[in-house]
Image (cartoon, rainbow, N blue to C red):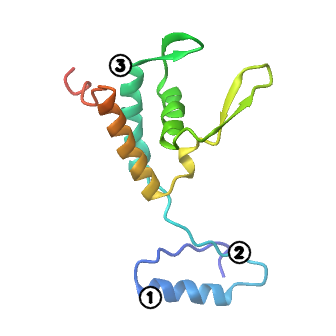
Amino acid sequence: MKDKRTFKLQHPQARANAVEAVRAAPEGYVVVVSEASRNLDQNAAQWPILQAFADQLQWPVNGSMVWMSAEEWKDVLSAAFKRETVRVAMGLDGGMVMLGSRTSEFGKKQFSDWLEFLHATAAAREVDLRYREEA
């Protein structure tokens, strides 16, 4: 048996193959059944939206309105997407660190919801997602 096999459970034969692989697995092997992870197209789709926020909207940081990077916007928006239930820890040098806000852990469905949230938030904040098309 191969060390690792992945089965996409889309039809009865795939399910049967997965069951047979479990039956044939050596003692101590592990089985994980999960939602499919996000794909590269989904991942790529978030960055133009985040860049639009970075290019068009200032945000208060340490008491001043500043331009943030797309990566920083991802931190702020992913916290909002999770209803800002992430935790904040004290940094080693006294600053603050936001914990638990990782889009890399999203499955396909949650990542789709994330992209929908980004579009809705952009509309609510009047961030033009087509601004680069006009240039």
Tell me whether circle 3 and circle 2 mark residues in contact (CB < 8 Å): no
Which badge, 3 or 1, comes first in the chain's sequence? Answer: 1
Q: At 52% across and 52% down in the image, what residue appears?
A: 106
Q: At 35% across and 45% down in the image, what residue appears?
A: 116
How would you rate the neighbour count of disc 2 (Cα within 10 Å): few for under 14, some for 14-19, many for 20 or more?
A: few
Residue tagged by mark 2? 30
Q: At 78% across and 79% down in the image, what residue appears?
A: 28
Element on which disc 3 rests? helix
Residue tagged by mark 3? 56
Residue tagged by mark 1? 13
Which of the two residues, 40 or 70, is positioned nearer the viewer here?
Answer: 70
Quadrant of the image for the N terminus? bottom right
Q: Amino acid at mark 2?
A: Val
Which badge, 1 or 2, comes first in the chain's sequence? Answer: 1
Q: At 52% across and 86% down in the image, what residue appears?
A: 17
- Residue 41 x, y percent position in the rendering: 38, 49
Q: Nearer the viewer, mark 3 or mark 2?
A: 3
Quadrant of the image for the C terminus? top left
Residue 67 numbered mark, or none? none
- Residue 93 x, y percent position in the rendering: 79, 19
Q: Amino acid at mark 1?
A: Gln
Residue 123 against residue 40 in the figure, above or below: above
